[in-house]
Image (tube, rainbow, N blue to C red):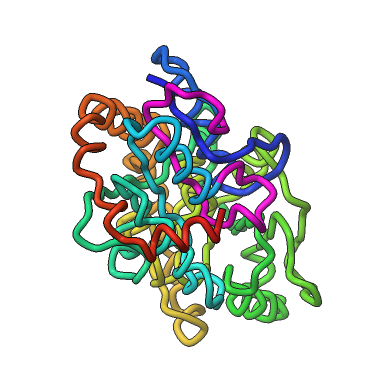
Amino acid sequence: MKVSIGYKLESGPWGGGNRFVLELSKALELKGHSVVYDLNDSDLDVILIIDPRNRSHPNITFGVGKILSYLLFINSEVAVVHRINECDERKNTRHMNFLLRVTNYIADHTVFIASWLIKLNVWRRGSDYSVILNGASTDIFYPDKEKNIDKHILRFVTHHWGANRMKGFDIYNYFDKLLDDHRLSKIIKFTYIGNLPKGVEFDNICHLPAMNGKELADCIRKHDIYLTASINEPAGMHHIEGACCGLPILYRNSGSLPEYCAGFGVEFNGVKDFEEKLYFMISNYQSFHKKMSEYENKSSKRIPEWVALFESLTDKKNKISSDRSLWKNPLILLLAFIMR
């Protein structure tokens, strides 16, 4: 099986999509499959669309127009899979859902990285789809088995590559102000790893630059509780990496976070109930910590689901090609060519 993934890998600190492509590529190659990152080969079995922003995103190697040309003129017997991991709701934009929806018309199968995305107007409803949750690599993100959980000071941590305020900066700034209270600052600390929006500075929170791989995991393991306040998070990797490092999660009731975090920490709704839930987490830290060994969103479990999906689609790609209905919609074809 030969799979083309429309994404150029980066080394060093980068976003969750980069880590997903790296893990998926490794898994496919370990099973003897070939992975390429362009549409130059005429014998592709599966094409994976990672992101519709082929003109504005430096890592996207091909978009909907190039895929359409490939299907029309090179090889129609290939399965096209669309991974939906974005939406306008995430960053208050007004274009992403439209790009996703148009792109989805050439997809034979859609994969959502969280169930809440299904209800959004980002796909061709009624077409084949599945939900495959994200998972972190436990070769890197694993718990510290020697951790002392009987502590007088609890250390909170979060990390984000993207510097968007909807990553939860209303809560992070509020937490920073709470730490003005010297009594509180004696029992808890908070570290933010990653990029900050312009104009954001912390008085009491320790800010560290973006990290990657083992360096990031080692830093997370030095902490006790993971905090994510992200709003309308499609899925993300940050909280998963924290959980795989053995940290219970204090998480916002928004987007995918309840699906990924329920049962492994404490949920809050916003600034109004954050302080109450913060103290509840502190009081029950040890019991939540013991639960983390049951956390299942690991790449060793989730990535094989992708490989199995690709193998299944390859087995029936001839039928997929004959049933494909995108040729029946000239408007979509026109939009696809405009977007190439």
Q: Position of residue 83 (x, y in %)?
A: 41, 48
| Pick the front one: 99 or 70 | 70
Q: Which residues are magenta?
A: 37-62
Residue 134: quarter of image: top left
Q: Is 41 colored magenta in this rendering? A: yes
96 shown above or below 82: below
At a point 50% along the width and 31% down the height, the residue shown is: 23
Q: Main secondary structure of the magenta part?
A: loop
- Between 169 and 283, the residue placed more toward the observer is 169
Q: Is residue 61 visible?
A: yes
- Looking at the picture, tell me which residue is in the foreground, 226 or 136: 136
Q: Residue at x 60, y 57 (%)?
A: 158
Q: Is residue 301 visible?
A: no
Where residue 273 sits, quadrant-wise, is bottom left
Instruction: Tell me if residue 229 comes above or below residue 297 in the rendering.
Output: below
Q: Is residue 295 found inside the magenta-colored segment of the image?
A: no
Horizontal relation, residue 53 to residue 30: left or right: right
